[in-house]
Amino acid sequence: MKPEKSRKLDMGLDSISFFKNASQRMQWLGNRQKVISENVANSDTPGFKAKDITSFSKMLESTQQTGMTTTNVRHISGNSQNVSGINTEVDKEAWSETMDGNTVVLEQQTIKSNEIGEGYQLAARLYRKGYDLLNLAATGIR
């Protein structure tokens, strides 16, 4: 019998809930920016309906693990739901609709894009501060 190789302790930052949430927030913001960009690209397309993605809180609720937990990489997962939890839907808060049926208002998309940029900067700063605090706790060096 071969001796079992010692397992390496995998302690990535994503295993800490604070960092996981900040990372998920950045992913959600990136996906939202992609949808907003598609809206802007289709601002002259007749009949195009502005879109947005589900809220961050809904994404978190849908990504919470339910069902069986796997304890080995070879086990079959009991969770068959969408892993990302991010769904695109028609924007119900679109400001107006043109005569050709398009609901993209560039000013509204610009405001949303700016909110996304600010949200991303905040998440990145929080992620960095959390890392700095961990580093301080581990090394004692500021």
Image: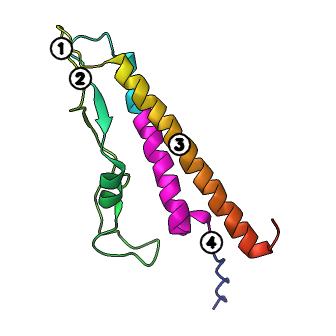
- Residue underneath mark 1: 101
Residues tagged 1 and 2 counted as in contact (Cβ below 8 A)? yes
Q: Earlier in the sequence, mark 4 or mark 1?
A: 4
Marks 1 and 2, how far apart at CA: 8 Å
> Where 28 falls versus 102 (above or below)?
below
Q: Residues within 10 Å of mark 3 (few under 14, many from 20)?
A: some
Residues tagged 3 and 4 counted as in contact (Cβ below 8 A)? no
Marks 2 and 4, how far apart at CA: 44 Å
Disc 4 versus disc 1: nearer the observer: 1
Disc 3 versus disc 2: nearer the observer: 3
- Element at badge 1? loop
Q: Earlier in the sequence, mark 2 or mark 4?
A: 4
Which residue is at a point 25% across and 32% down the rendered structure image?
91
Q: Earlier in the sequence, mark 1 or mark 2?
A: 2
Q: Position of residue 22 (x, y in %)?
A: 52, 55
Q: Earlier in the sequence, mark 3 or mark 2?
A: 2
